[in-house]
Image (cartoon, rainbow, N blue to C red):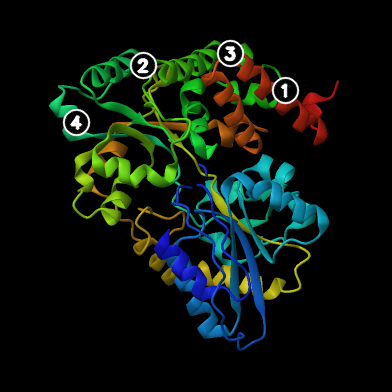
Amino acid sequence: MKKTYQAVVLLLLTSMLIVSCATAPASTPAAEAEAPAAAEAPKSGIILTYMASQGWIKDAELELAKKFEAETGIHVDYQIIPADQYFSILKTKLNSGEATDIFGGQSGKTDLQVQYDVEKNAVDLTDEEWTGRQEPLSLDMVSLNGKVYGIEIWDTIASNYFIINYNKTIFEENGLSVPKNYAEFKDICLKLMDAGVNPIYEPIADGWHHVLWFPMIGPRFEEANPGLAEKLNKNEVKFADVPIMVEAMTQLNELYTLGCFGDNALSDSGSDTSAKMAAGEYAMVLATLTQPVQVAVDYPEVKPENWGFFPIPLADNILVPAHPAGPSKFIYSGSPHIAEAKQYLAFLAAPENLQYLLDNTPDFAALNFSGLTAKWTPEQQEFLDTFEAKSIVYQDAVNYVNPQWMDMGKDMVAMFTGAMTPEDVLKSIDQRRADMAMAAKDPAWAQ
């Protein structure tokens, strides 16, 4: 984050960089906030304010913002908010009519409607040129009722879904191989603990990361119960009524109870992930396909090829998730600089600038626009060739799941500490879904 922070300081005029913790599904280390350095007023006199959650703005985008200012005279003032505070702050600003010119948000139809009310608070971008180059699934995730309200510039494959990264050396030294089901996975964890090795680094303190274990195996839920997502969206079934969901939550709780996440999981932070992986303190971590590449950037002595991958094995899952939703950019409908904000989004979406962002972002291997050159490593390609992708994750497929992400995280911590059962957690998810659905006047919940 130090490098990122230095870039932000150069860009900021009067705002300050606020950081504390890493989304989701972002993982950038925190840094201490300081007063920003003074900067000359932009030549045009126009300052675009842009609020985003920590980890959503990459160093290369900050460099592109400098280039944009040099070409147009328009300054972009990034305001970075800690992940655990971001959505409450954003909602407050939207409700009070004080949102920034551009605001970040996770895409997905439920989020667009429930979290941001884009039909009221965001600008219609349907006629923008770049919509014709955005991958259809990603474009759909920033669309509502036939209109495009945002732009998602993100690696929706290598940097967007989470799978198990495992240290090949540790596995080889302990005679271990990639598990084919949950029983084999648990056995690996127990053998590692017997050998004095921490099995899995799980940064629960961040509030969001441990939630990934459950909705990310949505394709497995769907495989076991064809049409389940549709039934959930029609309010024909509840999470707590689905045996495989109870099984998955119970197994996650078992991993914690057995000590598979180490002795300090409740206080471990995502900002330490690269260091823990580089030091070989843990055999596995739930992370993206590009996490080993990022580790190699931070610790050049660690080679990306030392890491392999397999899907989250809860409920015997062996499927790769598809996750087209991700951090996206929206223009606030009350902005006095709508034209300039559209100009900046179009600038970022220009093919040469997209390629620059891709080439200069270690945790991106591809971007969700046509006409770009990806940069897959052999290990990443082997994973994609080995494991089948069948359907999308449940935070994308099922309504009213993603907006309650942090609340699910709190419930899971209560489960880990014995205050809730796995069934209680699922019932709590069902209740929040019902509350959001009724607030949205969803006809499927009309009684």
Q: Secondary structure at mark 3?
A: loop
| Tag 2: amino acid | Tyr
Query: Picture coordinates of residue 384 (x, y %)?
Result: 31, 38
| Tag 3: amino acid | Thr
Q: Which residue is mark 4?
A: 170
User: Mark 1 to mark 2: distance in Å?
Assistant: 29 Å
Q: Is residue 326 above or below residue 179?
A: below
Q: Residue at x 71, y 71 (%)?
A: 338
Q: Which residue is mark 1?
A: 431
Q: Which residue is mark 2?
A: 182
User: Mark 1 to mark 3: distance in Å?
Assistant: 15 Å
Q: Which residue is mark 3?
A: 421
Q: Nearer the viewer, mark 4 or mark 2?
A: 4
Q: Residue at x 36, y 24 (%)?
A: 318
Q: Earlier in the sequence, mark 2 or mark 3?
A: 2
| Tag 1: amino acid | Gln
Q: Residue at x 82, y 56 (%)?
A: 96
User: Mark 2 to mark 3: distance in Å?
Assistant: 20 Å
Q: Earlier in the sequence, mark 1 or mark 4?
A: 4
